[in-house]
Amino acid sequence: QVQLVESGGGLVQAGGSLELSCAASGRTFSIVTIRWFRQAPGKGREFVAQINPSDGSTYYADSVKGRFTISRDNAKNTAYLQMNSLKPEDTAVYYCSAQMGPVINWGQGTRVTVSS
């Protein structure tokens, strides 16, 4: 089982940047698929980005494509979400998840607030 801790959230003005981190425990980080999701107030959880363990291939929601970048450092057991050109509609609690086979682990989330 992988335990995840997100950090890096905060308050930023529109157009600004933040980098979120997702620190993982355990020895299996290098073989898990990492995803970032977000949940805005009053809305459901939505997919943001994914990075695969095998080849590092990445996928993004259309709403963040070109602005957000997901990455991972297996040596540090940490994944990142670099968020640029932030918009008020990016305001949400951001969660990372780690999937290996059918098992998915979640972090507790980190709040991002983008002011206009």
Image (spheres, grey):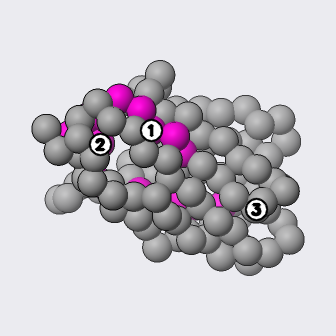
Query: In front here: 17 or 43?
Result: 17
Quarter holding the C terminus? top left
Question: Where residue 55 sits: x, y (%)?
Answer: 83, 35
Dot 3 surroundings within 10 Å: few (below 14), some, or many (20 or more)?
some
Say which mark, if any, is on residue 83.
Answer: 1
The residue at the point 73 percent across, 32 percent down is 57
Quarter holding the N terminus? bottom right
Question: Where residue 40 sits: x, y (%)?
Answer: 26, 54
44 relative position to 88: left or right: right
Name the residue beneath numbered marker 2. 90
Query: In front here: 8 or 25?
Result: 8
Residues at marks 2 and 1, CA–CA distance in whole angstroms: 9 Å
The residue at the point 50 percent across, 53 percent down is 20
Question: Where residue 50 sits: x, y (%)?
Answer: 60, 42
Mark 2 or mark 1: whose residue is earlier in sequence: 1
Name the residue beneath numbered marker 3. 77
The residue at the point 23 percent across, 35 percent down is 14
Residue 42 sits in quarter: bottom left
